[in-house]
Image (tube, grey):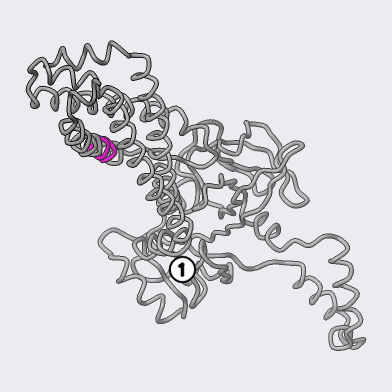
Amino acid sequence: MISLAGRDILHAWGKFVFTGIGLGLLIGVTLTMAGVYRGMVDDGKVLLDNSGADLWVVQKDTLGPYAESSSVPDDLWRSVRAMPGVAQAANITYLTMQVGHGDKDVRAMVVGVTAGGPGMPGWPPQLMAGRQITRGHYEAVADAAAGVRLGDLLKIRRNHYTVVGLTRRMVSSSGDPMVFIPLKDAQEAQFLKDNDAILMQRRRTEANPAFNRPAVPDLLDAVIASQTSNSYVNAVLVRLRPGFTPQEVAEPIRLWLRLTVYDRAQMEGILVGKLIATSAKQIGMFLVILALVSAAIVAFLIYTLTMDKIREIAVLKLIGTRNRTIAWMILQQALVLGLIGFVVGKITATFAAPLFPKYVLLVPFDTAMGLIAVMAICVLASVVAIRVALRVDPAQAIG
């Protein structure tokens, strides 16, 4: 019985193998699409892991700092640090923008980290090359996905930053690579205006009699200085002391400082459930459609391959071959075709994943479920093909 299926495959092995390869490419696309969905979710979780925070203190009634704009005073961290159960509190800014690199632009999330060095919340936890930021200005640590190397210059607004360190898998929730710069530089970049805009704003301020008073000569300079400075950050990242729960620390901050505080579970829900929810649903729907199309094509191929050898099946029936033997032969060929297609698809998805601009995460669970689904479809399709083939009259099929 095994040799019967094997000999039939060898009789037209070229057609069988190329059919399996074509099927495998379709399965590979399906697995890759599942990996794209997994990668989007993983990007959001990696963003939270790499922040090193247990709590996120943001502007009241906002979903900041990732899903919405949030603005809190940059001296607020002192009040947060004084709260019971707080081990560390650090300011942080996030700004997604085009960063100049040579003669091209790179879409990146610029992160402003406070002074203090590695180990503080918000700092990159580890480097793959180079060193951390040690100066107060014009140094940067960038993710390798940005396509930069040590010593490269990045242009952020009007200033240039030297890349002194490289990280890996430090990305935003949308998959953009992160670029870490000193907090003061990031605050300036977030609200920096061009020279013409600054000049026009100064002229309007000078023309306002409320600010330009002869009796108070220093008032105008003070107002202009306040307009060109930025004393706000997007959030305060908090790390807890051992023995304290997030709720125990968050509730006093909400009560006394009148701010919104999110723990890890809540922030993950915001990122996955709100920020990338629409994109995830869109990819999920496309994945379902692609899976249904793949299932239909698998079933159609198996049915077609069976109907192409209906004459051979008729001859087998005429020479006395049992229906069980014929059914087992069709089932074996369907399973072999499905196995070839899945192996080709898995190899295709594995080699194609690094070529995508977004992170593609191929997890063993999806691979196992894909194999089970392909084998199940092959079995069901072969059952239908067997029922049709065994009902064919041998005399009519040969004649």
Q: Where is residue 142? Give x, y as percent.
A: 58, 41
Q: Is residue 365 left or right of residue 28?
A: left
Q: Where is residue 211? Give x, y as percent.
A: 84, 84
Q: To which quarter of the image does residue 379 belong?
A: top left
Q: Where is residue 351? Give x, y as percent.
A: 44, 27
> Going 92% across and 86% down the picture, which residue do you hit?
214
Q: Nearer the viewer, residue 126 or 380?
A: 380
Q: Would you place residue 151 above or below residue 264 in this image?
A: above
The residue that label 1 is drawn on is: 57
Q: Residue 373 magenta-drawn? A: yes
User: What's the magenta region?
Assistant: 369-375
Q: Nearer the viewer, residue 32 or 94?
A: 32
What amino acid is labelled 1 in the image? Answer: Val
Q: Residue 110 magenta-drawn? A: no
Q: Is residue 50 visible?
A: no
Category of crowding for the residue at label 1, using alpha-carbon neighbours closer than 10 angstroms: few (below 14), some (14–19), many (at least 20): many
